[in-house]
Image (cartoon, coloured by chain):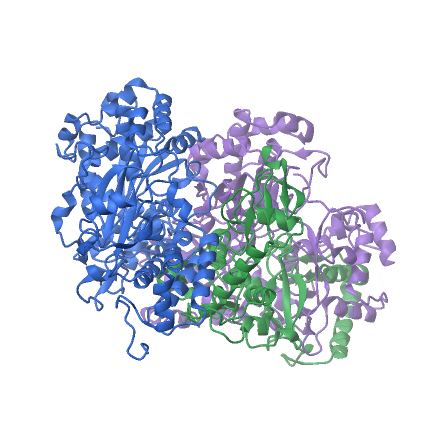
Amino acid sequence: MTAKKGVEPTPILNALHSMQEKEGKLTRASLEEIAKAHNMPIANIFDAVTFYHYFKLDGDSDKKSAICKGPVCSLPGIKGQDLADMRSISCPGLCDSPVPIFADGEFRGTKGVDQVFELPHDTGTKGVIFRDSRKRKGWILDEYIKFGGYGQLQSLINDQNPEKALGVLKESGLLGRGGAGFPLALKWGAVRNAEGSEKYIVCNADEGEPGTLKDRPMLHLEPHLLLEAMAIAGFIVGASHGIIYLRYEYPLAQNILNKAIEAAEDANILGNNINNTDYSFYLSVSRGSGAYICGEETSLLNSLEGKRPWPRERPPFPTTSGLWGKPTAVNNVETLSVVPRILENGAKWFQSVGLGEGNFGSKLYSVSGDVNRPGNFELPLGVTVRELILNHAGGVVGGGKVKAFTLGGISGGMLSGDFLDLTLDFKKPQEYDTFLGSGALVVLGEDSCVVDFARSCAVFFEDESCGKCYPCRIGAVRMRELMDGISGDSSLIPDTLDHIKEIGDVMTTASACGLGQSAPKVLQGMVKYFSEELDFHITKRVCPTNVCGFDANNTS
Amino acid sequence: MLKEETLKVVINGQEVESSFGKTILECARDSGVDIPTLCFDSRVKATAACRLCSVNVKGRRLPVAACAQKMEPGMEITTDSSDLESMRKTILDLVVSENPTGECVRCEEIGPCELHTLTKRYGSKPGRFHGALSGEKSKDTNPFIFRDYSQCILCYRCTSVCGELEQAHAIVPAGRGFGSRIAAAFDSGLLDSSCTFCGQCIQTCPTGALMDRKMLGQAKASEVTKVKTVCPYCGTGCGLNLHVANNKVIGTTPDWDSPSGEGSLCVKGQFATDFVGHKDRLKTPLIRRNGVLTEATWDEAYDLIVEKFTQIKEESGPNAFTFWTSARATTESNYIMQKFARAVIGTNNVDNCSRT
Amino acid sequence: MVGRGAMSNSIAELKESPFILATGTNTTETHPVIALKVKKAVSNGSKLVVIDPRRIELANFSHRYMQIKIGTDIALYNAMSNVIINEELYDKEYVAERTGGFEELKHFIREYTPQYAEQITGIPSEDIIATAREYAAADSASIIYTVGITEHSCGVHNVQSLTNLALLTGNFGVTGGGVNPLRGQNNVQGAGDAGCLPNNLPGYQRVGDDAARANWEKEWGVTLDPNPGVTKVTAIDDMILGRMRALYIMGENSLASDANAGKTRKALEALEILVVQDIFLTQTAELADVVLPAAGFGEVDGTFANSERRVQRVRKAVNPPGVAKPDWQIISELGERFGYKKKFNHPAEIWDELARNTPILAGISYDRLDFQGIQWPCPTSDHPGTAVLHTDNFESEKGYLMPIPHVGIAEPTDEEYPLILTTGRRRATYHTGTQTGRSAGIELLVPHEWVEINPEDADELKLDDGEVVSVISRRGRVQSPIMITEKSPPGVIFMSFHFPNETPTNVLTTDLHDPITETPEFKACAVKIEKIAQHHKNQSDKNGTQNTNQSLKMAG
């Protein structure tokens, strides 16, 4: 019998997870066993393990139950009850179902388990990725195939003309949906042209940005679309392995993906000699263990290699030196998932989907916070904030005005309600020192406190800073401390605003990766657009919305 | 070969020739432009942690880390704009904000540490940014490497040197974010780790976080002189500096210019020089009297040798003597010994321990 | 044979060498800093083949480790020559122009097929073939070795058969190539350079060379004996026979470091006068009639020559204790009392006398050594020194390929003595422990001697890890705890000689030696292990070796 799977190229994370599942924790003996099996120094395994939220070493305290205290879940309209004495977890991507709880190894939003099969909201448009999702169960191979699934992969293999497919993608103008907006065809062309016979396709399914939950429905409902896209990518760039780096917080997606891979391999649609052709493409899922930084592509690659997931210096870029130093295409779930659609319907069609000049295709927007209808929305790229928040997400809870909204989860910056006409594309937000990022918006109504929200954001970045570069490692802590002072949790430091500005500038300009560079953005938006509210906090020691906990002594 | 081709770039308005494969930092330093760093050790891969070496490159939105960025033809680089300098000052203010204030033992006893040399230059003082401190003094009791991580600035030079250069993989970064720390596996002491005690972590450390425990408490830095010499152990001939205070060798540091050592030492050169001046040292000549070795003067010792040697030489000739010299002593002393054998006694019976 | 008893190339060059063959060298332990260059080369993609009977640490860095049966080196290198010649991988031009003896070697080597060598060495023939091919194919290939090659009764032949490989492939005179003995002691090279050899005047000028002798006679104002003197090994025999009546030892703990310590003791005790000049009262000094206190390292000015022929300045940092004096000064003063009046005020004057009569050192002066050392040959004051030997020619005009037959070790195992003892060093300790034994903390790293023994042998002898045993050879017995380790191959035990008081390993070793250099076979002698009666066994490691002072005496 021929091997269905190739050798798993990134076995270490999964080995650690299996060991932890078996023994409840990672003991010295089990780490030594893994170190030996993978020819790694024991200290390096220890190094990597201590980085993540969810690996548990002997002697670590039990994370029995915990809740999300992220920026979205801490909004006064959402948190409802005082959960201060519960342990906190980093954002598990259930911002549309707040406040999620982590217990017995499961993450549960208030909407319960059914949520995993919840489609994006119906926006009245046809949809690109979720085009067929209301008509059939996309996670079942037969149904996926019934609607033309794996047809694009098969015709690509039959045509033997990857250059042509790459040309179509280039013409379509598809930009990466992970946040950076890099042209997909350029990236794949670079990997295709890179030297070396061993290449990899890596899918970044590690969305961890507060407010961002767009990958979740794709992974749960359209896994085969992703697998087909990865196999197409492999054919185009010349790779025979695809790895999905899945965030720890989506355990169900792991099951769904593994089952989908198995079914497709059993049917010889993926795996060894696909449909008895020369093309083989193997897929595996590697599960992260709780680290926001792993959404950064070079950190992700280090994580896959079992190393400390610090970002790498670039150049070299992953396209020439990625996983194990080999040329690698790292793409977001959403970017990959539209690829079969483009190949099916053509570049012109894809271009016609977007709104406004240069905006091609659809975009999955996640909306959370003080809105009536939080969740995901597949809409043409370039829709306005107004339309997204007021029409699709049902407006602010209680009918009030939008006080503020963030972009890119919380890393793309924060604007005031005066900017509702902003178009949500890759260019326009940059004019206001913000960026679209993942396409997630967190909305603050008038009862929310911008200062407290900014403080929560600072806490998030402090928790998630990897600790490599100084501006971020130290800056993130100092920013949170300064915010604590403003919101009354500790004494106010003189020159607080100057310090926020100074440290923010250094973080933005000098941090090693996007995390540090964007970490101060919400705070910078606060300073820029909410100076009055801020001044109340600082000089009057009063929170106008009564969210910040000033002591009686302080409120003179 | 392409690699050896030169390229031209502009640094601070001056055209400079460099070669492919070099980083901006290397090229700048080659051409006499100083860019401050804290996390850089040329022998290992740049981690680009401190970002002090960030420079502006024309056409780039953000500054780039000069230690990690390779030169590209035509680059126009600015290393010393006021924006960059004030960024450096802010970073240094942040760095000193994570450590306790108070005197630096390394500066006091061993010599100015890199961190405080830089903070002095930038006029950076602790206390401008307030907040939590990082790191704590290690409980590790190993006799060689003093570890006080309250002084650590997480430059990760020690872990890079341990992993990449020495490849001992004894210490690694652990944890994450502001809680990151330097640790041996399972936070054990170094004696229970794969540490070889080469001491390279101490030598690369830019602060007082890692120091030679044996050297501590011996003298003030101002009382110490450094004498450049060569390690007395194996045949590698690593260069080292003996640190001397009050006629006592208090420790060693590597000689970075040593052609064979290239700045490295092993546990012996680094930590095993206390035999110099050890209490067991022979201090006077000894003569066997009534079967017991007893103290004597040089004259007594010489007289005894002359008397006995003369007698044997007269009776049996020069070839009844043999001289064993030392592969541990200087070439000059060895030369004198064989000269004594050949020219004074008259025998070629001279040998050294090269075959043992 | 090509001439010099020194590294043909330089230490730092190893970093750049594309292929390193490390044989008979436990580099990470004996030359840790040289090992760094090898590790660096491997990290940069160079190939490393390690040949050693023990699975030493360096093997972990190699791409091929070949576990050779002790004392079968010649068969291995001959088989590699066989492959290189048969497959015509040798450098034809180089062999024709620069070497002699090719046809004889070609004829001789025919019987040394890789299959034949496999039977002798235990190394699979395919590994021998692959290594020969890689060695020959490399742009340059460096051979490094330590006393694992020379401390055999066939040490010279080992070196000669190894040298054949470098000659066949043109690896002399090229950067990153050569044959490189890594010398064990700081100034073993300098002692040889200075003429401390019975057959050599300074600078390796033969005592039988009339012109050289005449030159030195003129310099010293005496008549010199044209006949070579005796080596240490012969001298010991002569002492026992009563022919050698006086011995003057400068800085050597011969009783502990020389092979067959029982015999050495007997010889020293037979002397009429033993003068020992040293920095500590060593085991050897305890036997002396006169002990002279010398100034040691850090207390004297002078030079050391390292393994790569680099003459380097050592400097006085502190005053010697008591009335101790530099070695050169003591001997000069003694010379004066014998009527030899030449006086030196400083080692620089001694150097000048040596250098001006020694062509290879003539260009070196203290002034030039001030910043960095210089590698000999350095014939003139404007010569930069020589990093790579034999770039133009060999000492003997041509490099001679030598047909060397394989011979077994001098003392093979038998029923009574079924194990082979091989000796060596451990990283943190040095030689007889005179210096490292007096450096605080070292005792924590290597607290005492261990007998390293393979688990199979330990099983057969029913030994527990850490158990104190007697190790017995035909010449004596010692006691030591054992360490059960896969590092030792079955049938071979390893011991160091760092603890001459507690475990005087050299009472076991044989003084059977190489006929040319008279270097004893420290690397192999036949021993057996005996359990010690039960009541001893419970004693801890620390106490377990307390009786061994007695065994030192008993052995005599």
Image colour assigned to chain A: blue
User: Going 33% across and 51% down the picture, which residue do you hit?
Assistant: A418
Residue C211 seen by the camera: yes
Image colour assigned to chain C: purple
| Viewer-side residue, A378 vs C124 | A378
Q: Is residue C145 above or below residue B345?
A: above
Residue C516 as seen in the image, left or right of residue C355? left
- Residue A268: image location, x then y, percent: 21, 27
- For residue C266, which quarter of the picture? bottom right
Q: Is residue A37 above or below residue C352?
A: above
Residue C31 seen by the camera: no
User: Going 47% across and 57% down the picture, which residue do you hit?
Assistant: A506
From the image, which quarter does the N terminus of chain A lie in?
top left
- For residue C244, which quarter of the picture? bottom right
- Residue C491: image location, x then y, percent: 40, 50
| Viewer-side residue, B187 vs A188 | A188
Residue A458 as seen in the image, left or right of residue C140? left
| Viewer-side residue, A117 vs C115 | A117
Image colour assigned to chain B: green
From the image, which quarter does the C terminus of chain A lie in?
bottom left
- For residue C101, which quarter of the picture? top right
Q: Is residue A321 above or below residue B103?
A: above
Q: Is residue A70 above or below residue A440?
A: below
